[in-house]
């Protein structure tokens, strides 16, 4: 079966049975310089309805290479729960408002989880 037909079959099955399609929701991780920037970006994401939830995790230490030098800093991490179909739009939007030259914006699909929570994500993030 072609990937397109398989995808359509999964969506139809999900609609008829109310089951979750693995990978249809994702978690995105975004690093921020401080708590105020993290809150501003989180609020902006929510205002644009690009996520059902954004967690703001407290300071963590980070080691990384920047322009050939080993750097150490503290960062605030955002964990964004959204539809996988919104990741591109989320990434573009965050890059447009983030103060870092190259912000960390990475995502992972959600394969499994609490079905009611996964349904809640889908209900709270508009389709494309």
Image: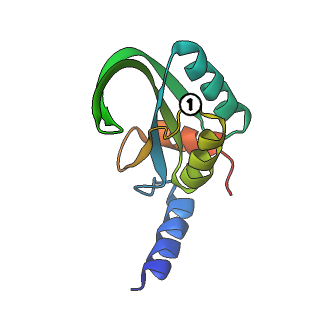
Closer to us: 126 or 73: 73
User: Where in the figure is residue 27, as x and y percent of width and height?
Assistant: 44, 41
Q: In this rendering, is residue 31 above or below 68?
A: above
- What kind of colouring is applied to the model shown? rainbow
Residue furthest bottom as drawn: 1
Q: Quarter holding the C terminus?
A: bottom right
Closer to us: 124 or 37: 37
Residue drawn at 44 percent across, 57 percent down: 21
Q: How many marks?
A: 1
Residue receiving disc 1: 53
Closer to us: 94 or 48: 94
Residue drawn at 60 percent across, 45 percent down: 90
Decide if residue 32 is on the left or right side of residue 113: right
User: Where in the figure is residue 18, as x and y percent of width and height?
Assistant: 52, 54
Q: In this rendering, is residue 60 above or below 16?
A: above
Residue drawn at 42 percent across, 46 percent down: 107
Closer to us: 43 or 122: 43
User: Where in the figure is residue 8, as x and y percent of width and height?
Assistant: 53, 74
Q: Quarter holding the N terminus?
A: bottom left
Secondary structure of the residue carrying numbered label 1: strand
Q: In this rendering, is residue 61 above or below 109?
A: above
User: Where in the figure is residue 119, as x and y percent of width and height?
Assistant: 53, 43
């Amino acid at each position: 079966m072609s990937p397109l037909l398989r995808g359509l079959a999964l969506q139809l099955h999900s609609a008829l049975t109310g089951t979750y399609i693995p990978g249809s929701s994702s978690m995105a991780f975004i690093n921020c310089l401080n708590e105020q920037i993290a809150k501003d970006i989180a609020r902006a994401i929510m205002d644009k309805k690009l996520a059902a939830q954004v967690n703001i995790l407290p300071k963590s230490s980070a080691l990384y290479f920047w322009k050939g030098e080993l750097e150490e800093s503290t960062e605030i991490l955002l964990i964004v729960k959204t539809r996988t179909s919104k990741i591109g739009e989320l990434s573009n939007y965050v890059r447009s408002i983030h103060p870092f030259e190259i912000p960390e914006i990475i995502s992972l699909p959600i394969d499994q989880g609490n079905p009611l929570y996964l349904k809640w994500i889908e209900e709270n993030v508009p389709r494309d």
